[in-house]
Amino acid sequence: MEHGTRLVILGKQGAGKGTQAERLARQYGVPRISTGDMFRLAVRSGSEAGQQAKEYMDEGNLVPDDVVVALVEERLQKDDASNHGFVLDGFPRNVKQAGALHEMLAPDGVDLVIELDVPTEVVLNRLAGRRTCVGCGTNYGPDALPRDDWQCDICGDKVVVREDDTEAAIARRLALYDQETEPLVAWYLAQDKLAPVDGQGALDTVTARLLRAVESRLGPSGRRSGDVGPRSPTGRPR
Ligand code: AMP
């Protein structure tokens, strides 16, 4: 069955996932769905769910799977995502979540999973200078400062150090990425849905690589439609 573009972007914190996911989403006219942003919004709203999530987030731990899965399931049912597709950023983060996502999207699952690859030394360097907008989640750094005195260029809200960008929480999140999220690379590779992309270099260079990776696998519409037929070893329809 034909459906919209369903992409997942994997990568360590600081790999540039959020920015690149936003660009991909714009390119394909789909929402970027970031579970981290959804939790930060819940924390700001002061809801009970937000308070519970905050305890995990501040330590750099994963929020329990059932909470995240329910949140994503509800979000994917909204018209924008169910009609057009999505770029998922920050979900799935372990094999259990990936299995739940597969069930939500049965029988096709996601179209393509991009692994944005950046070495740990590089992400640590980037995270040391990272500042984030409290309103829309846009990231800034020493090479990309907001135009106006720590006010977001996009929404005008405050740009600050994220509460969970402490040294301990960063180390914990990187360790969890290796233990929990990295196994997804093999999981999606086995399903022929993985596209590794080098995440180092200028933003535009990385975006161009991402778009090439998506197009070479899914075609210019970025969509794995039901009628493309069998794929060659390069992923192109034969
Ligand atoms: P992020 O903005 O993706 O780095 O997410 C910030 C924090 O939100 C993470 O460190 C987790 O505590 C929580 N979180 C976001 N996505 C997930 C997920 N898929 N599973 C569990 N926890 C998550």
Image: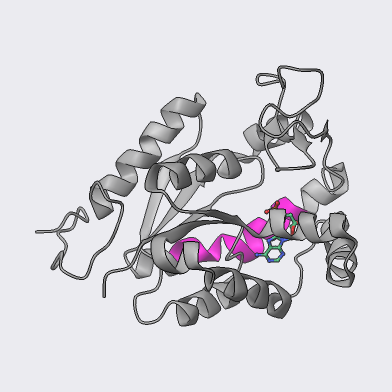
Tell me the quadrant of ligand 1: bottom right
Q: Residue at x 50, y 23 (%)?
A: 202
Please state if 153 lies on the left or on the right of 108 as rendered. right
x then y, percent, for residue 24? 44, 44
* Direction front: furthest residue: 79
Query: Is 11 positioned to the left or the right of 198 in the image?
Result: right
- Count of marks overlaid on the render: 0
| Residue at the outermost left position | 238
Specify how the rendered protein is coloured.
one colour
Residue 60 is drawn in which quadrant? bottom right
The residue range painted magenta reads 173-186
User: Does residue 144 appear left or right of residue 219 in this picture?
Assistant: right
Q: Position of residue 159 (x, y in %)?
A: 80, 32
Picture residue at 56% right of the left edge, 49% below the top: 11
In the image: residue 48, left or right of residue 226: right
Relative to 176, residue 63 above or below: below
Residue 95 lies in the magenta stretch: no
> Residue 154's x, y, as percent?
66, 32
Residue depicted at 45% across the width and 69% down the height: 82
Q: Nearer the viewer, residue 70 or 118?
A: 70
Q: Residue 113's quadrant in the figure?
A: bottom left
Quick check: can you spot residue 7?
A: no
The secondary structure that dominates the magenta segment is helix
Residue in front for this viewpoint, 167 or 154:
154
The residue lying at 87 percent from left, 43 percent from top is: 166
Residue 62 on image: x %, y %: 75, 65
* The C terminus lies in quadrant: bottom left
Residue 185 lies in the magenta-colored region: yes
Q: Quadrant of the N terminus?
A: bottom left
Q: Is residue 25 visible?
A: yes
Is 182 placed above or below 138 here?
A: below
